[in-house]
Amino acid sequence: MKMMDKRRKILFAAAAGAAVSFCYTGGALLEQYESLDLTEGTFYLKWLLWGVAASLVLYGLWEAADRYGEKIAASARLARIRFPLPAWLCVLILLLCWLPAWLSIFPGAFAYDAYDEWMQVRNHRLTSHHPVIHVLLLGGLTEGFHGLTGSYNVGIGVYTFLQMVLLSFLLTRTLAFMKEFSVPDFFCWIALLFYALSPVMQLFAVSATKDVLFSAFQLLFLQDLIRISCRREAFFASRRRLLSFGLTAFFTMTLRNNGFYIVLGTLAVLIWVCRCYWKKLAPVLLGIGVAYALYVGPCYSMLHVTGGSVAEMLSVPIQQMARVHQYDYESLEQEDLELLYRMIPRENLERYRASVADFVKEGFRQEEFRKNTKEFFSLWLKWGKNHLLTYVNSFLINTVDFWYPNAVVDGYRDAYGRSCYFDYRVSEPGEEIVLLPRLHRYYEAISSDPEIQKLPFLFLVLSPGWYLMITMLLFADLWRRRLYTFLAPGMMFVLSLVTVLLGPVALVRYVLIFYYAFPVLLPLALYPGWFTGNQPCRAI
């Protein structure tokens, strides 16, 4: 058995090491040249050498974890650390730590899609392009308080404050989750400090983007998945837990459009994992399905919600064809070009930028696509067959900021070289008020100065690729340990990543769940026994 475990450890270390090596070697080339020559032997040699090094490191870490994991878990030093703070005080601490960020850009960072969501409410033309429940909340408060006070800033400020309060409460549930599983209080302190002091947490706490509340409810959905995975019988015996699971699943599905696919795919895995409890699981799944059907059916009809643009779901093929048009134009047939121009104007194709699809897809003619859907995909497959490496490069460069830990997140970089780590501004109809100028300059530097992201060790706080790598290696270790009970939580992360990889650009807000989940995954990575063992539950 020990020999089989050793071979399994070697195999998993090799596979994970190869993935880590590709992220670094391929990511570095894409970051520098916006292209990866997959026919060059030097690249594969570097990939192999770094892969061997990464595999050896991972094997050593896993060997140490197997030998000393239980000793670390039973450490007297960890046991002496106490976390006596009640939940309400933790909420207050988070609000106080986020308050300076709010005052640095009062009434809140009204950016990203906030303007479009407000305009939908103002013009009484709701679409499903953005989650309707968030559109009504954000746009309704902004427009409603303007009607009462004559100031848009009041509505934006009210929304931001309510979001901060709700977010602080939802994140604080992580501390109760750890206590439930008897995780040492040391990790509760780490979680509280991380949520309170990380500039990513502070910036997004005051940002009026749908991704903030979506990711917070997704975090609760993850915690329920872990409860089901590790304490199945107790979970299904609790009506309160089942109701909580249904609510977190529903809000994950409705607060961002890709949430529907994340929950649907995860629940499919959960049905198989919990097949012995199908009688108790079936009513919950039925309730989730009925609630969602009522939301997108009668509710949408009552609010006269129209469909969003199909171009959002076609970001990858549109970007791939635009890259072929940009770099292999001379090899294209005139008949194919005329077909493509009917759906995407040539001027948009010529605005191609490797890291973001928005400049091309904003000219997408949806009606023409509906008339020529079959022809569009036939052309996409034809060009893909003839320009496979171009297609692969298009996908890699468009997503590299998600998975390369040293990447500079700058998909929307402007002519002056400023990056777009965070959209730090108050757009219309709000008016920016800077009450803390020095702090404003600090956050502005993080948001737009690419050199800040290149500082040594700062990637440990900022880089989405770093948090993605931690999550990937954690679940590789769980499968290596044969802890297949975590299959459903792992699927949630896989689907979260896949759905954003198919999007138009790599932005931090799309993968906030990897940041929010870090304090939960950290103790799980160090010693899964806290979750899979038979320790008694502690009072919450």
Image: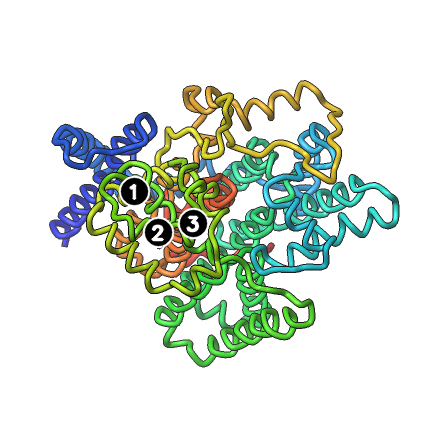
Residue type at tag 3? Ile
> Around disc 1, counting alpha carbons within 10 Å, would you say few (fewer than 14), some (14 to 19), or many (20 or more)?
many
Nearer the observer, disc 3 or disc 2?
Answer: 2
| Residue 9 screen position, x and y as percent | 19, 46
Can you identify the residue that label 1 sits on?
324
Whether residue 478 is situated above or below residue 425 in the rendered picture: below
Residue at the image position 32 percent from the left and 61 percent from the top = 375
* Tag in front: 2 or 1: 2
Q: Nearer the viewer, residue 353 or 60?
A: 353
Residue 338 circle label: 2
Q: Indicate left or right for 59 with 71 as reference.
A: left
Please state if 162 lies on the left or on the right of 356 as rendered.
right
Secondary structure found at label 1 = helix
Residue where numbered disc 3 is placed: 344
Per the image, label 2 sits on a secondary structure element best described as: helix
**Which amino acid, mark 2?**
Glu
Give coordinates of residue 172: x percent, y percent: 61, 47
**In the depicted structure, whether residue 68 falls above or below residue 307:** above
